[in-house]
Image (spheres, rainbow, N blue to C red):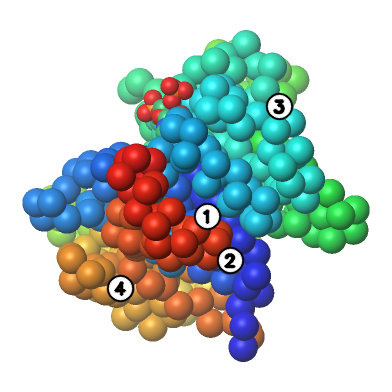
Amino acid sequence: MSKPLAGIKIIDFTHVQAGPACTQMLAWFGADVIKVERPGSGDVTRSQLRDIPDVDALYFTMLNSNKKSLTLDTKKPEGKEVLEKLIRESDVLVENFGPGALDRMGFTWERINELNPKMIVASVKGFSDGHHYEDLKVYENVAQCAGGAASTTGFWDGPPTVSSAALGDTNTGMHLAIGILTALIGRGKTGKGQKVAVSMQDSVLNLCRVKLRDQQRLDRIGYLEEYPQYPHGKFTDVVPRGGNAGGGGQPGWVLKCKGWETDPNAYIYFTIQGHAWAPICKALGKEEWIEDKAYNTATARQDKIFDIFAVIEEWLKDKTKFEAVDILRKFDIPCSPVMSMKEIAADPSLRASGTITEVDHKERGKYLTVGSPIKFSDTTVEITGSPLLGEHTDEVLASLGYNPEQVAALHSAQAV
Ligand code: COA
């Protein structure tokens, strides 16, 4: 069966992570994604953090699978001409250059719209248009700080902390993918393209909305009952860092299991979901707590939540994280082992579902990557290796109508 996005042609003018994550996902689902890269060097991630000399780094290969690579110097007139031809034939142009770079190249929204009124132009920037920081270049952790994630992550006695999850980069790319698909559906109705803009700050904030919820609760009542600071600690007028506390109405914490002294990941996340209180007590052998008024409501438990966690840790001390979860799952308790990357790489379920998948690369050989987290009933997502720099240049030029002599001329002008 042909893939859902087959026939959609995307000019992938992206680099590093935020943009490439977006276009990679669209390529997985069948779009024809042509990555446009600067001749000679290409996407900077090809050479960042290399583990094999002179071979594309994993940073690049894991974000650029299923794409074609076209080298093009879009500052040279010959390169601009190729890009113009591509724009006329494509559906979407995705870019995440620094502010103003596309305009400086001569490809303003107005110009692109003139070349192809059906074109969707999708951009990632650090801050949204008109924002007082709109001129800033932005990377992952900058966005996490700007979007409210860092001030609310970590422990109350430590500094603001960034997450290792790419809330600024890949998350923004996923927002952009939703925007592009929406614009494509819109175009089906109006026949017109449009500009789609996503900022990294906004995308991080979109994931931090419960913290804005908490700010408003704090402003109104002066405390946040699900935070470790309640009821014994102090609140100021800003949402504090809550350590590993659950962000919703379910208290939870990271708890030590057997071996924590030597294994930095010998922990589980344990959630005390209200309706699971009786099963929790049964699992712990603390049946007397089930009806005890000092324990049997969330409010009653709140002032002794860390004593309860201490009892659970006592129960956990002769169980590995996997043994503990195998017992707790039978009691319907929401919990998980804290998984290391090594364990994730070898996890049989993640392998079976294709979420962790092995891919072949022409120079590197086999490598692991994260496959599609989205599963379809009638579409199989096959992940193919990332392209070498300029691997598809001649093929793309031929498809644009360039004959071999013209292609050779573009090469000798170093425009491709
Ligand atoms: N041919 C010719 N020139 C090219 C080119 C090509 N194929 N591809 C890129 N360039 C040029 C750009 O036109 C730009 O030139 P100019 O500044 O002289 O106008 C130049 O390369 C640098 O581009 P820029 O995107 O500003 O790169 P950078 O390395 O200085 O900054 C970022 C990197 C990521 C900080 C910046 O791109 C950015 O802030 N992007 C938006 C936010 C974002 O996506 N950040 C996260 C990335 S994971």
Q: Amino acid at mark 4?
A: Val
Q: Of helix, strand and loop, which one carries label 1?
A: helix
| Disc nearest the viewer among 3 and 2 | 2
State which tag comes first along the sequence, 1 or 2: 1
Q: Amino acid at mark 2?
A: Ala
Distance, label 3 to label 2, CA atoms, is: 44 Å
- Mark 2 — residue? 31
State which tag comes first along the sequence, 3 or 1: 1
Distance, label 1 to label 4, CA atoms, is: 18 Å
Q: Residue furthest front?
A: 405
Q: Quadrant of residue 134?
A: top right
Do tag 1 and tag 2 residues touch (Cβ < 8 Å)?
yes
Q: Amino acid at mark 1?
A: Thr
Q: Residue at point 38% right, 72% down?
A: 384
Q: Position of residue 415 (x, y in %)?
A: 38, 41
- Mark 3 — residue? 217
342 relative position to 198: left or right: left
Q: Residue at point 57% right, 36% down?
A: 124
Look at the picture and state if 156 lies above or below 245.
above
- Mark 1 — residue? 23
Q: Residue at point 33% right, 22% down?
A: 158
Q: Of helix, strand and loop, which one carries label 4?
A: strand
Question: Mark 4 packing: few (<14 Cα in 10 Å), some, or many (20+)?
Answer: many
- Residue 370 circle label: none
**Residue nearer the viewer, 179 or 313:** 179
Q: Residue furthest right?
A: 190
Question: Mark 2 packing: few (<14 Cα in 10 Å), some, or many (20+)?
Answer: many
Classify mark 2 as within 8 Å of ligand 1 or not, answering yes or no.
no
Query: Image quadrant for the N terminus?
Result: bottom right
3 relative position to 58: left or right: right
Q: Residue furthest bottom?
A: 1
Distance, label 4 to label 3, CA atoms, is: 48 Å
